[in-house]
Image (spheres, grey):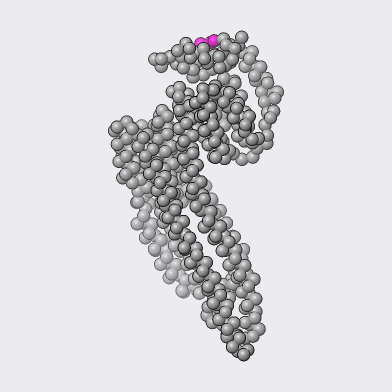
Amino acid sequence: MPTYQFEAMNSTGEEISDVIEADSQEDAQATIRQMGYFVTKLTEKKARKAATATAAKAGGKKGRSFAIGGVKSADLCAFTRQLSILQDAGLPILRSLKILENQSKPGRMKNTLMDVCEEIEGGATLSEAMGKCPKVFNRLYVNMIKAGEAGGALEIILQRLADFMERAEALKRKVKSAMIYPVVVVMVAVGILTFIMWKIVPTFEQIFTDFDTTMPKMTTMLITISNYTVKYIYLIPGIPLGIYLAIKLLKKFEAGRAGWDMFILNVPVMGMLIEKNIMARTTRTLGTLVASGVPILEGLQIAKETSGNAMFERMYGKVGESIREGDTISKPMKEYSSPGFHPVAAMLWVTFFVAPTTPVLLLGASVAMPMMLAAGLCGGMFYFMKMNRRVVDDLVINMIDVGEETGELDTLLYKVADTFDEQVAAITEGLMSMLEPFLIIFLGGAVGFIVIALFLPLVSLIQNLA
């Protein structure tokens, strides 16, 4: 009969270490629970463990398929919900994982579940096994599983984790679906206008030149734009690609990333959407961790990592430092929620205002330089007005303060997250309502300008021929 080395805790919280004989790992766990202990670690000893290791070396990779990339968040969300249902039904964790492994399609998720099952068969706990797969199970996931194992409420923690991931996935899906329409419309419009400038307008220009037609200013402007489009057509994909690469390069540096994150938070409408989305994600993360029994300092560190913004990372880091010194959460959060001055952010705002005026350089430096200088000053003034705007408002501070006083911090953090989720949905709908008429007006104006500019000389040409 196999022998198992186990570590457990008794009813008073003392750690117990002993050995036990059982037919299987599940039987060993059941026997230990009957003894009144809570299992924290169970390891199979000697012969069976060696046999398992030998089998893993000989055929451990059998059944694995080649996989590129990570696991989609929607797949991980579905796995978590299914695992919580199986655990709630009372199935052993290893059997639950085997069931989910068998029904998974070949790929990264199936390979990962195979690895997790092998680790558990070797005596590791679920959190330890998942911790060895950081590309699939992040720190938030592993720490919540660890808290569930320590508290003996793994099925409850899995339900909370599944609820958390489903809410986050629903919000992400809503924002993505809202942005598809304007992105597609803009891309199609740019393609059509580029084709007109590249192929259609030069043909009309040749006709007007052959008939020596006097062209009005609108037509001259259209032909000039067409000539520049044909000459510099590579800039149409090149400029967006160059901006994207410049931003990626800037964010490689710590100061550049901090400046970009502070810049993007002050962009009208879009900055507010990003800010509230981050607040919803971090407060729900922190609330879920606190409710699951994860220490507050560990929870703040995980919330900091999930924010994805240097400004919020700094704020949560300062909150953690203050708590180590015996302070509350609300006071340092209020104190460090103002970005303050950052030279890279100031430079980006000046560039943001100056960039739209650069085409005026075609009219000459004497005309363009005063306009660009004025635009730069406007960008600097705008930044100085916005740089001390707090990213956490008083409502959040007060609710967290009340939660700390009443011991209901997790509940109030959930309420804050729900409020911001609703605001994100409302801002997204408002942004869509604003973009649709703007795109229609822009496209109608562009097409109308082209039609009028081309038909005015045609009318004059027809009159001359008559």
Residue in front for this viewpoint, 440 or 270: 440
> Does residue 314 show up?
no
Q: How many marks?
A: 0
* Residue 369, placed above or below residue 400: below
> Does residue 406 show up?
yes
Residue in front for this viewpoint, 25 or 7: 25
In the rendered image, the residue lying farthest to the front is 89
x 57%, y 19%: residue: 123
Q: Quadrant of residue 327?
A: top left
x 54%, y 36%: residue: 78
Secondary structure mostly taken by the magenta-highlighted segment of the chain: strand
> Is 141 within the magenta?
no
* Residue 198, placed above or below residue 291: below
Q: Which residues are magenta?
A: 16-20
Which of the image's four quarters has the C terminus?
bottom right
* Residue 5, placed above or below residue 208: above
| Whole-percent x, y for residue 262 in the image | 42, 50
x 45%, y 12%: residue: 36
| Whole-percent x, y for residue 127 in the image | 52, 27
Please give left or right for residue 275 compared with residue 395 in the image.
right
Residue in front for this viewpoint, 195 or 418: 418
* Residue 251, placed above or below residue 367: above
x 33%, y 38%: residue: 400
| Whole-percent x, y for residue 195 in the image | 62, 67
| Whole-percent x, y for residue 299 in the image | 42, 33
Q: Quadrant of residue 228?
A: bottom right
Which of the image's four quarters has the N terminus?
top right
Please give left or right for residue 123 compared with residue 302 in the image.
right
